[in-house]
Image (cartoon, rainbow, N blue to C red):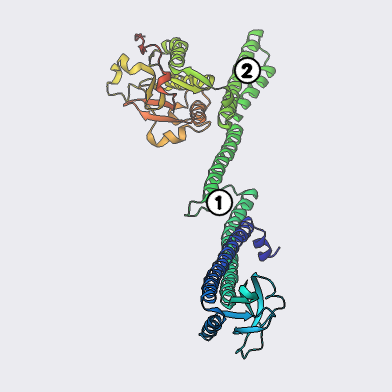
Amino acid sequence: MTAFGKLIRTTAFRLTLVYLFLFALFAASLLGYFAWNTRRLITEQITTTVNAEIAEINDIYTRRGLRGLGFTIGNRALRPGANLYLVTTPAGTAFGGNVGSLSPGVMASSGWAETQYRRLDDQDTADHRALVRVTELSNGFRLLVGRDLEERRRMFGIVANAAQWSVLVVIVLGLGGGIFVARRVLQRIDAMTGTTQRIMAGDLSGRLPVGRSGDELDRLAENLNAMLERIEALMVGLKEVSDNIAHDLKTPLTRLRNRAEEALASSGSEAEYRAALERTIEESDGLIRTFNALLMIARAESGQARGNMDDFDAADVAKGIHELYEPLAEDDGMTLHVWSAPVRVHGNRELISQALANLVENAIKYGKPNPAVSPLGARATALSKEILIEARREGDQLLLSVTDHGPGIPEGDRKHAVERFVRLEASRTQPGSGLGLSLASAVATLHGGELRLGDAHPGLIATLAIPALAAAADRLAPQTQDVPQKVA
């Protein structure tokens, strides 16, 4: 298809033609109405003048008779630019006036008529048109008074000529403007098409060009670019997950296989076989937990969990996690506290609970104070072994936070720590898959919020910040705080 063919097929060009047709029709109608109204006004002016003159001449004829009539008609006919005058006898012969010829039958009937005529002193052989009125005088005489219509014709011609040129200018300017607009739109669409073709070819880094006008094409390009960024992030995440699964799950699977081979190769007792099977089951359960975490992250990132969202009190979630993990914290020599205020939130309770549970598990695993680096040395107090779960409202957000007083996460590693299968050096000695913070971040993003990692001086504050419901819905029981339990 040629460039011109593409141009005339654009929506912008077709809309320009439609608007051009409508505007030209409107302009032609307006000018036509102006021409018609001008013609009507001139005709009314002629009729008013002729009627007044007939009344005056009729009065002169009544008072002065034929001699006065002939004298008046003769004088008026000699004036420059005079009207048309003609007086005929009852027999139809001319008695006076300046009209040499008329269309047949004009003098036979009284009233108004448009007729062809010639003046007596006219050197031009061409006929002219006039608007005349014929009236019958006493004694059978007839009087014709009229006005030449050349002025009306000339005025109408001027308006018609202006209308033609106006419509022509409108068409030329409209077509030029339509081609200009269509070309600009077509250039932008072609640029977008080129980018989309590169994206379809596999280059997800391509983005649609965004201009400075802020028009609908720019808004469309911005939304599509946001969508492309999301798609690129998902594809990068999918690739990372695939790579991480291939890398990080290879070791436990290899270990699982080696243990099975060792159990088969050995000729030990039944107890040894049982121990090997128990280790195999334990390793398999760890793999199942890893895959379950991956599936939960996938559900959160894909938005599938939005169908199970409901309104609930976040304080109940914090208290439930506290009751669930308090014995585990005691077994590790930690003290788990909860401080909650009633905050209503709309979300997936299961995922929010799992995300908060992951943060608490990380705090129990990695939040133990290190006497070697603690400012108190070996005399670390019970305060440094405390873990605090908080649920509170701040502005229009719900903040679910877990605070510990362990080594924390260096600021430069916090962004990296929320990625899948990432385990920092300080945590490699502890069991885990490196998916806890990834799941918490995915859940926060699903609910329109974020996971924040801050410094507790010392320690880490991990906070789920998600939008809360209106304050009017938060009329629940007053805030509560548990009694700290000290564990040796």
- Which amino acid type is marked by label 1? Leu
Which of the numbered marks, if any, corresponds to residue 280? Answer: 2
71 lies above or below 206: below
Left or right: where 159 falls relative to 488? right
366 lies above or below 154: above
Residue nearest the observer in this picture, 306 or 258: 306
- Which amino acid type is marked by label 2? Thr
265 lies above or below 50: above
Could you tell me if residue 132 is visible in this image?
no
The N terminus, quarter of image? bottom right
Q: CA distance from mark 1 to mark 2?
A: 52 Å
Left or right: where 426 falls relative to 37? left
Could you tell me if residue 394 is visible in this image?
yes
Mark closer to the chain start, 1 or 2: 1
Q: Secondary structure at mark 1?
A: loop
Which of the numbered marks, if any, corresponds to residue 208? Answer: 1
Q: Residue at x 37, y 30 (%)?
A: 454
x and y, in percent, of residue 220 in the image: 55, 47
The C terminus, quarter of image? top left
x and y, in percent, of residue 377 in the image: 29, 21
- Between tags 1 and 2, which lies in front? 1
Contact, mark 1 vs mark 2 (Cβ under 8 Å): no
Residue nearest the observer in this picture, 368 or 167: 167
x and y, in percent, of residue 342 in the image: 40, 16
- Local crowd size for mark 2, using a 10 Å CA cut-off: few (<14), some (14–19), many (≥20): some
Residue nearest the observer in this picture, 437 or 46: 46
Q: Secondary structure at mark 2?
A: helix
